[in-house]
Image: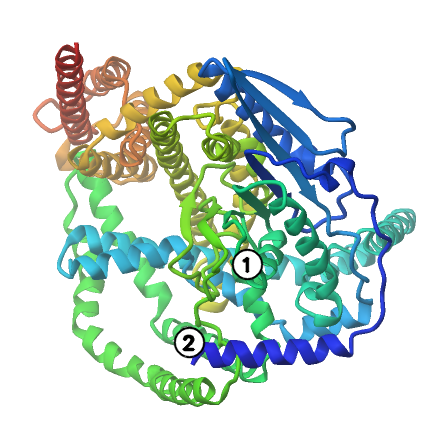
Amino acid sequence: MSRSKESRRNHSRSHKESIKPTYTPTPSKADPKIRSTKKYDSALLFIHGIGNQKKGDVLKSMANPVAKHIIHVAEKYDWQTEVEQETPSSPIIITARRMNHSKTTYLDECIWANSFPRITFWEFMKWLAVRISSPIVLLIPDKGDIQVIRREFELHKYFSVKAYLKLSGVMLRVLFRLFLLFGVSLLVSTAPLLLFQFLLNSSTGLRVVVIMLILIAMSCLVSLHKKANYFAHVPAAIMPSHGEYMLDTVKDAIRRTYRLTKRPTLIAHSQGGFLAYHALKDLSTKKRPKWRLFGVGSGLRPITFLDRLNNRWALSLWWATSLYAFLAIGSLLALLNHADFGKNLRFAGIHLYFISRAILGLPLSSAEINYLSEPLRQQSHTFLSQVFYLLQYTIPLPLATILLGIFWIVANRSSSSPLLFDRIPPLKCVSNWTEVTTSHDLVGRLSLAPLPSQARQQDTSGLSNVILDHISYFKTSILPIQIAIEALGDAQILTKSELDNERDDINTLNDQLNALSQRRWHLTTFIISALSAILFAIYMLRNGSMSWAFTIIYLSLAVTMVSVPCRLIEIALSRLGPLKPPSEINMMKQRRRISTHYRRMIVVGSAERCLGVFLAVIGMGSILATYIAQDIVVPPETKVAISPQSISNLWTLGVLALFGGVAVVFKYRLHPFLSLGLELYLSFRIVTAPSDGFSVIKPGLPAVMLTLFATTLITAIQCSRSLTQQNSTDSEAEYSI
């Protein structure tokens, strides 16, 4: 069925091509080296993404980092290198010599930014209006989530705790994206209203200044849109009347490159990945070399998804799916709205109160027990009735699911083109296809439309930012090193054994950087979630309960506003710490640093992480207990004296335990002497606090005992693991000697 769809699609495109308007871009002057018949041992062609790049820009931003690593690795194996480049916009030719052998590598660029006519503003608005629901695709599980789900179901670990935790992590990530997308949408939509209200309540002089600034900003945006017109690049690529000019430019560059070598490599970034795919798809493989293709943060999947929406069946199906998503979210909100959110929050507060009193070591009075236990008893009697009452709000959802399934079957049988979840066809003229992206790239991580099994997907490290990751592959990742190694292998500068060793080293380094990057990302996400929850709890304590609609709005805005400074701090730390990729200058030093941090991370096992959760809970309870102790009414018969010194030390101990437990959960090692030393000092201050009665448990003593117990166990397990790892390393070294 896919072949018939594809053939009909090609026929449609050929018909549109015959009626496309005449537009002849200004031909660029061909470089003399391009017209020459000289053969190179390997050739690399770089294709840029969205932007208005000029001659030499792609060579500077993409080819130069790769060329530096080619020179560095070649000289590492005693090759003498020479670099030839006539002008900054001319191709780069690297010649490597050793004894009687001479090998050349050719690096060139393809500039398609000025090869197509720009679409008008109204054409763009029409295109956007039809696809206004496309941002919902950001909520669909990305390629990493799909890999987790597929792996767990293939292993059939339906009753495994780890499997449930991983699947829960997928759901939490989708929920986090929902909050973030909703928060950004709220900020964008309400910004004009807030600005209008600000102008109404401000003075006349301030109004004039603000209005002048708004007019200047709007004029700058209009002029920038006319000059840059970035948003029109994607619509133009999927319009046959515009996209054919882009494809012709890319095809010409591809033809020039494969005439120069038997081992061509194509590196395509962002929208260039979409153009490179369609350019290679039309090439014949007879008597022509097969390409090595690197898709870098490739826009092949998302742009293909947008391209398929040109089909009315695919567009109708997507709108039906979008309405179904809104119905599902609305049913969930209605369900939660009738679940008495305030009462459930009160019950959670009751349990926290129990834990905090227990940490203080203070008994509950009889009045407190009756006051706290009665709501819990009432909740247990009404729970089942609430469940059956709320089931009525989920009835429309199964009916909508059935209707959507029927419509999906009808669309799949009636459509002549590939639909949303159909795989992208493979490429016959490609022998090695690698799609490289970070785990957080807003473009590269998307799962629609699915790639063919021919393409190998590879995660690389980056700044851990959904926007900056997409434009910094050749600055903050090891991708240039990887491309350089493959180019040296194609040029036969590296032997097979040397090439395998370099591949193993770079793959190991990539895995280590990815693990360290994911650890920091997960920690930052946890901090964002925790701070948002704290802000929400503070608001609830001050203003009382709120509706579920306002709860969703408040949490979305809190997550969005907290994410900005946390992610900026994360980006700043990524430029300095072990996540900074090695350059050709500090290669060995940075590799040793990365390996050291990675070994420290893998030492932290499941047992320490479970103890870290326990330690973090004790720390949170200790912090809450200090606030409860300030307003607590102690029964007179207990004769317990609460000292301010003891309470302040308990708060400090709680903060230390909380941060230490969270660090261990995310595989950060505790400093054994520093952590235990501080906890012993604080524990001594708590235990020796003055008290009127000596026959009762001192305030905070349970927290002291539990914190010291958990920290001591974590430290002992980590020390034993480190000794075991060191002994195994020493034995391996002796065996190799």
Mark sitting on residue 300: 1
Where in the figure is residue 415, as x and y percent of width and height? 51, 85
Mark drawn on residue 502: none
Q: Amino acid at mark 1?
A: Leu
Q: Position of residue 580 (x, y in %)?
A: 49, 26
Q: Residue at x 54, y 17 (%)?
A: 97
**Residue nearest the observer in this picture, 490 or 368:** 490
Of the residues under marks 2 and 1, which one precedes in the sequence?
1
Against 261, residue 698 (above or below) is above
Q: Is residue 68 left or right of residue 197?
A: left
The residue under label 2 is 328
Dot 2 amino acid type: Ala
Residue 82, picture quadrant: top right
- The part of the image, by quadrant, that contains residue 160 is bottom left
Quadrant containing the N terminus is: bottom left
Q: CA distance from mark 2 to mark 1?
A: 29 Å
The C terminus sits in image quarter: top left
